[in-house]
Amino acid sequence: MIRNIYKCVAGLLVLAQSVSAKAPEEKKVLETMKQATRFMMEKASFNGGFVWSYLPDFSRSWGEVEANRTMAWVQSPGTPAVGQLLLDAYHATGDEYYYQAAKKTANALIWGQLDCGGWNYMFDFAGENSLKQWYATTGKSAWRLEEFQHYYGNATFDDAATVDAAKFLLRIYVEKNDPVFRPALEKAIRFVLESQYPAGGWPQRYPLKYDHVFHRKSDYSSFITLNDDVIPENIDFLLQCYQAAGLQNVREPLIRAMNLMITLQQGAPYAGWADQYTVDDLQPAHARSYEPRGVNSGTTVRMIHVMIEYYKLTGDTKFLARIPEAIAFLKSQALPESEVRRFNRTSRESSDILVPRFICPESGKPQYVHRRGSNVYNGEYYVDEDIANTIGHYASASFVSIPNLEKAYQDALALSPAELKAKSPLFSTERIPLQKYYSAQRFGGNDLPAEVTALLQSISKEGYWLSPIAVSYPYREYPKEGVAYSGNEYASTNVGDKYDTSCFRKEGNMGISTGFYIACMMKFITYLDSIKPNIQP
């Protein structure tokens, strides 16, 4: 996810209110886009790869955790996200520079592609030994980021790492049918197909490993995974391969995966979806130590919308059939006002209900997550039924809009199955071009020219925008005698003591954000589209 850009955006919007209402010149916009991109490619990038953020002097840099300067992050907004933005800029301007820059980013991803065909969260141009050392130090010490505490050496579908890279390679390949990208793309497609379980789902990591028994629980990385949209994202990639490249062999696997989504819904009265499932019996399973085995209300909300999308793709009402059960389950989990007060957070709408995030699939009781200690070495997570003082980095309860879900369901029921099939890429006999732009516009307002002018005025002479970034304590070796801590100072914080390498936000921490660069570029692209006919190379 693109993170922590909104405070900086708010400042830009304030600046926008004070600038002249005169529309920015197209030439100046194009020059600034090129200036910012050259800075990112020539200064921020390492061999065409990107992480999430940098100090202006590049003395430190971060992905989801602090990164070596020689690293490239695959998780968004990392290297694939920049590649997609560069193709967006190419489509908006017709300038070959952006296509060539996208090729450099694609080549970086090809360098980081594992032999199996997928990608890890990141890769290191300094080599695998450097990456292993990072895992043994910085990664191991990131208390709340348990996925970085063990070196597997295989690829991950988590946070769409593999699929984001594969989608970018697919898009740049079909852009000009350049054969240089075909081998890596075919390798990625084979990886996705090979790693799919017969039932239709995918593990979090592949090739399968079982070597990380964590907090006395079995290694969860082989479980069938819904968390972070692993299955929906893989389905979307295969669908793009089918519609844009005409690959017939991906149709059955993606339909099999869609059908599995029906099977994974639990029975009443807890008729929602879990984040992970054991492979043999398709029952809810645990993951990280703050992700207990349970039905997840947030995942259930997301899956209701996914099932509606699959109905629109297929015209098959079986994808809608059990949505009322899922909505009834969410309603049944509404917490009383006394618990809402104890949770100490407010909803956006008065009609929203507060529901526990994790619900025991047998008893229906809530599972709230807490932690004690001050770092990964002396701390631990635990679960109980007390909603007070839960962890801050992973919400133990969430607000749900039942009216919105019911409206989405009713709107879907009103659609004609025959008309949906007629428009679906699943039933088309012709290739369908991929969308023109992939990068979302992450901020906006009512005065586009003023906002663009604010961006033109706030870029540095070097070619970057400063924005708030998350930082971390540098890795330091944990003392052999340990650090005793029995308080609750870090119970709800994003970071523990100085031995915790997890990232945190603090007022005044400013740097160069890859996500903010993408957002600013999309603002320029939106403006260009508003003042001239669209250019499609």
Image (cartoon, helix red, strand yellow):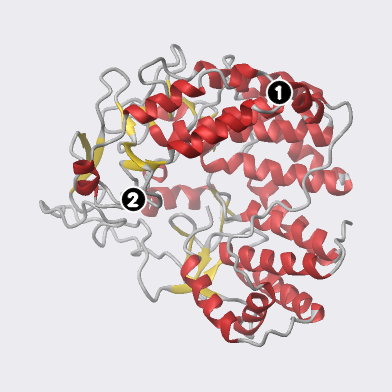
Instruction: Determine which quarter of the picture holds residue 451.
Output: bottom right
Q: Is residue 36 visible?
A: yes
Q: Badge 1: how crowded within 10 Å, few (<14), some, or many (20+)?
A: many
Q: Which residue is mark 2?
A: 393
Residue at the image position 19 percent from the left and 34 percent from the top: 384
Q: Position of residue 86 (x, y in %)?
A: 73, 60
Residue at the image position 40 percent from the left and 52 percent from the top: 348
Residue 282 drawn above or below residue 332:
above
Residue at the image position 61 percent from the left and 36 percent from the top: 233
> Is 39 situated left or right of 386 in this image?
right
Viewport quadrant of the C terminus:
bottom right
Residue type at numbered disc 2: His
- Does the residue at mark 2 contact the one at mark 1 (Cβ under 8 Å)? no
Residue 283 drawn above or below residue 179:
above
Which mark is on residue 314? 1
Residue at the image position 21 percent from the left and 37 percent from the top: 382
> Is 104 situated left or right of 155 in this image?
right
